[in-house]
Image: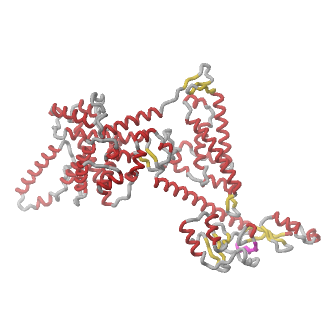
Amino acid sequence: MEDIVQLNQDYHILICRLCQAAVRPGSSIELHFRRQHQLKGQVLKDIKNYYGTLELADPKLTATPEDNSQAIQYLTISKGYSCNACRSLTTAKDNAVRHWREAGHSIAVAAAVAEEARWTEVRLQTWIGGKHACYWIVRDDSDSNGPSDTADTADNTSQSAMDELIAASQARLEQEDAVRLRKGDLKEDIDRDSPWVKRLGWLRAREVTGRSAGRQEDEEAARERLLLRRLGESFDREVERCCWRLDSVPTETLQWLNSISSVTPSGVPFGRKGKEESMSQYKSVGHRYLSFCWKAYRIGRKEAFERWAIRFTDEQWSLLGDVAEELESDRAPSSHDSGFFSGRERQAKDKEEEEEEEEEEDEEDEDGDEDEDKYQDDGEQENNGMTSPLQDALDRAVFRFIVASIKTHVGGNVYMNSLLCFCAALGIKPRPMGYIEPHLYTGLLAAMVWWARLFFLEAVFENQPLDRDEVGVEAVLAFEEQHRAWMCMGTHTVMSTIIGWMAYGKGYRQKMGGQPSIRWSEDGEGLFHMGEYIDVEDFTRTLRDEVVKAEKLLDKLFGGFWHPVSKKINMGRIVDNMIRLGAGQSFTSNPKNKWLEAGPAKVIRLMEASIWDATRVRWKRQRVKRWLRDLKLLRETLLVLVHTWGGLPNPISNLISSPGVVLAERQLGLARLYGDPG
């Protein structure tokens, strides 16, 4: 609080350190800091409660200090003029000249005295400025000359006040953004009116259930993070185990698995993803789903339904209980990979062989010392790569839960299903608040479809031999029957719904990304865009004029410094994307473009001399109004340019041969970045 306001003990006057002037007592204290400096909240309350109760002198009524006294700390020191014929003091030379003309000093004296000797340059202070200013002369205790020191002091005062204004503006913008993200902006028309969002029903589901809370990653305790990591590791082990089944079934079976039809198999067999990065990304979606269900289980079945509208089946909830029981076991699992190569029978057989070997070794070692050194506690493993009983039970529970999540029918409200509810959570974009576009969302759905098919294949062939030649006809026919029931379109299942969303997303991308109808005229001087004739030369000239107009407005908004500023911007370093990323997002919000220093600071610094009164430490209101009017004109010009440029068919864009057009288009975007004074 002392960096904002200070009490002068000698005169009992309150001094505002932000504008370096005295403040009148009483209700004027709150009014000054609220109106002049936009203070609010606890800071303003503390100032009012503390200084409002003190007996303070009124700077308008109190006597001024004696001339040539020491300067009062925290008050502005101004360059001024003292009349040599009387004690008239002023900070404006014009006032001093007018004073000699109107004061009635002796004409003889005026004639005898040179103009320069009629007044003396001095350093002045006043409690308050404006029409109530009452100056006194203060002595110069510094080694430097008075005017230079006065200028430095004024510059420092202005700089400090400007820094505080910029910091307050940026903090306010960040606070407003945080509030919007916390509440959720449900009125973003671009997202709200999107046919993609309407088709998937995200808006209705989110408004009813507040499902965005379901995907928030609250900071977990160390133990819970460990449990979730173990859950993800278990999922990874099951994915690796199930991948071995791909080499143990006929190719035609894999073609059926990769098909969404119950009539025709796919021409391409289902298989592993070629890149390790793709596998990791696909697995990460499975991790998120298990974490989502785990958090729902922790709050309880009833609470999960009331909060997120998730309805687990009895089988799913029971299997979640098995997962929780194994996951919360006090015994820590080994970090070794499971080493699974086949189904559960192979693993059970290996365990029986290990138990027989242990019995033989126990018979040979009567003391049991060797056995004690060689084997760990129950639930751990040796360095042979095999799964511990603890991991085996957890992996088995995870596998069965994933299969139970896949083999589920859905009705009208598909989002009551746990897996589809998770899909809705995946579709929510937290910053800025909105919904994920189809080209990003369908990739997440593809990941779910991939590991769902993998788990489904293992569930059907789990008890079949590893050798492909030994797989019987009955098993293959049973798989086809199960596939028709659970994994195809039109079955009212989880997979049928997800596949339908993917198909709609693909069609939506193709529809929205299509090129407009366009053809050249016979003479080559124009073209027909959606049936309308456009003269290329007229269009090019008009667009160039708009670019020139926008650049002139830019230069005005940047105080005549736009040209040198634009030269310092490395256009090749800017990371941009031609695909729409959502409401409120552009290349300016990309973290890779942080070096651009988005915010109001740059333009305010460049315009400071014309819009900021350094002496009185306040805005020049008329100049600011003109600046905002120019900004509005620029935005109107940008609306034309951005719309025209973004909607151009390729032939027209190639004809705009002005070398500065493309550069100007990006620079106009930068104007929006730096063009808001906050």
Place of residue 223 in the rendered image (x, y in percent of width and height, measured from the top left): 30, 60
Residue at x 25% of width, y 40% of height: 456
Q: Residue furthest front?
A: 412
- 609 relative position to 213: left or right: right
Instruction: Relative to 644, say whether 142 is above or below.
Output: below
State the residue in front, 586 or 387.
586
Magenta segment includes 174: no
Q: Based on the displayed image, in which of its 4 quarters is residue 116 positioned?
A: bottom right
- 240 relative position to 441: left or right: left
State the residue in front, 581 or 593.
581
Place of residue 42 in the rendered image (x, y in percent of width and height, measured from the top left): 53, 68
Q: Based on the displayed image, in which of its 4 quarters is residue 637 positioned?
A: top right
Residue at x 44% of width, y 45% of height: 435
Q: Quadrant of the N terminus?
A: bottom right
Residue 517 in view in this figure: yes
Q: Based on the displayed image, in which of its 4 quarters is residue 551 positioned?
A: top right
- 80 relative position to 161: left or right: right
Magenta segment includes 140: yes
Residue at x 76% of width, y 74% of height: 137
- Count the marks: how many? 0
State the residue in front, 677 or 350.
677
**Magenta part mainly helix, strand or loop?**
loop
Please name the colour scheme applied to the rendered image. secondary structure
Place of residue 464 in the rendered image (x, y in percent of width and height, measured from the top left): 16, 38
Magenta residues span 134-142
